[in-house]
Amino acid sequence: MKAMEMCAVKGCKVVNMSLGGPLEGSVEEDPECVLAEKLYRQYGTNFIVAAGNDGEEWSINSPGASPYVLCVAAVDWKTMETSSYSSRGPQARWYRDNKDAYDRDYQKYGGNFLKPDVAGIGGDRESQIVAAVSLWYDAFYDLVPDGFDLMIGTSMATPHCSGLAALAIDRGILSNIEDVKARMARFGEKSADKGYGLLTWSKLQ
């Protein structure tokens, strides 16, 4: 949370968050969701957040559950289907167990409340992707500290979407993640497994 705040104060427009955890209360109570909303409103910081790797319905993580972030699922680059491990919506487990709160917040936030929002290339067990990793992590797994490794996850998918959003905002094509969602909404309704679908440059223009 401190890192989120530091990024916002220093003027970062797009922040990749390849992390998450269980939602603690509603999106108006969970500390990370509350902070994401505050920083988005105050500084215009666009948080692009991994959905999670639980592979089940109602398994979206925080702060990806927030209506004020862009939540990213993963697709397999071989099949272009949702990756087996990718967390599904329509929201976090807390809302599955608190149906009244789900109905209330869906009524309040509409489509922005349903998650994930989009999908990125994350690979799958038989179709891993090359990912940049810290040297200590890389050397621990393959004993070759070259800064790259074969990995899968929504944490691999999220940087793809962060990069696309950053390019679009930098070039003045879009202003924020709300524009990203609006552009993607042209291609159909959200699904509980990959939101509006795979985010690509052509869809943002």
Image (cartoon, rainbow, N blue to C red):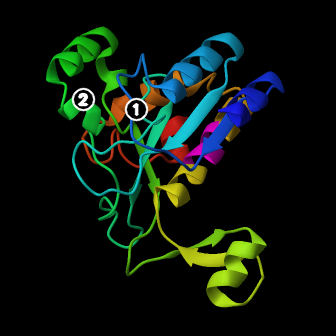
The disc labelled 1 sits on which kind of residue? Ala
Q: Are marks 2 and 1 in contact (CB under 8 Å)?
A: yes
Which residue, as the protein is rendered here, is positioned at the far front?
24
The mark nearer the N terminus, 2 or 1, is 1
* SS state under label 1: loop
Magenta residues span 161-165
Left or right of 30 in this view: 146? right
State the CA–CA distance, disc 2 to disc 1. Answer: 10 Å
Q: Which residue lies furthest to the bottom in this view?
A: 143
Disc 1 packing (10 Å; few <14; some 14–19; many ≥20): many
- Residue 32, compared with residue 109, is above or below; it is below
Q: Which residue is drawn at 77% across and 74% down?
A: 135
Residue 202 horizontal/vertical position (percent): 52, 44
Residue shown at 52%/41% (left/top)? 49
Closer to us: 106 or 80: 106
Q: Name the residue under label 2.
A: 95
What is the quadrant of the C terminus in the image?
Answer: top right
Quadrant placement of the N terminus: top right
- The location of residue 95, given as percent across then percent down, is 24, 29
The foreground one among 134 and 191 is 134
Amino acid at circle 2? Tyr
Say if 87 sits above or below 43 in the image. Answer: below
At a point 33% along the width and 62% down the height, the residue shown is: 85
Q: In this view, does 23 lie to the left or right of 133?
A: left
Disc 1: which residue: 65
